[in-house]
Image (tube, rainbow, N blue to C red):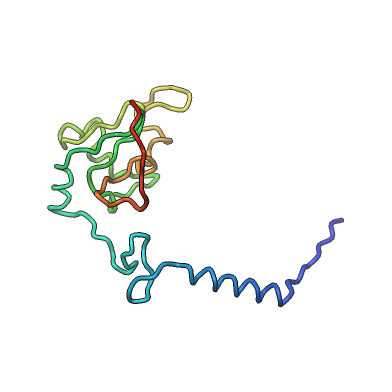
Amino acid sequence: MKKRFLTLIPATMLTAGLLLSGACASVIASDDSGGLATLRGASVSAAEKTVTGDGLKKALETPPVDRNFTDQPPLVSHAVDEYPVTRAFNKCLDCHSRENAKKEKATTVSNTHFEAADGKVLKNVSARRYFCVQCHIPQVDAKPLVENTFQQAE
């Protein structure tokens, strides 16, 4: 028979925990108005603009960013905020599928995305490669948060 014991937290430990959580909260960055701020110093309440309409067309016309290492997933040259990817539907495949890529003037999904874990070639995109934004992220022109001294391999 198992016995269960109920441990009570002493009031002094509870008080110390509350004080520590308050101290941690004071370290969080704030903007000029006293609100929360991002690492770049912008106000958290200031929503970032998403690319839509003409902006999306302009983003599609921008050249892709070079890859920095072998097998790096290519970056997406447009916003993907409103591109739903669920178990039943993948908006990315509307343009990037083998059937639609040429018509949409989009990059075709790589053949590697049609391979199962055991190497078997599949008719449709593999389940392990179906959620595009796991690897492919939108390219943006944002200043770095920290200094980067990365050098591309020869």
Q: Is residue 66 visible?
A: yes
Does residue 111 appear left or right of residue 102 in this picture?
A: right
Answer with the quarter of the image where residue 7 lies.
bottom right
Figure quadrant of residue 35: bottom left
The one of 48 and 5 positioned closer to us in this rendering: 48
Residue 65: horizontal and vertical position, in percent?
24, 38
Question: Image quadrant for the C terminus?
Answer: top left
- Residue 54: x and y in percent read 12, 52
* Residue at (15% x, 54% y) in the render: 53
The one nearer the camera, 115 or 44, is 44
**With respect to residue 117, does 137 lie above or below?**
below
Residue at x-position 20% and y-position 33%: 101
* Residue found 33% across the figure and 44% down from its top: 89
Residue at image position (74%, 74%) is 10
Q: Is residue 40 left or right of residue 7?
A: left
Outermost residue toward the right?
A: 1
Residue 84 to residue 45: above or below: above
Say which of 19 and 107 sits in front.
Answer: 19
Q: In the image, residue 33 lies at what x, y percent?
A: 33, 76
Does residue 58 sit above or below 105 in this rendering? below
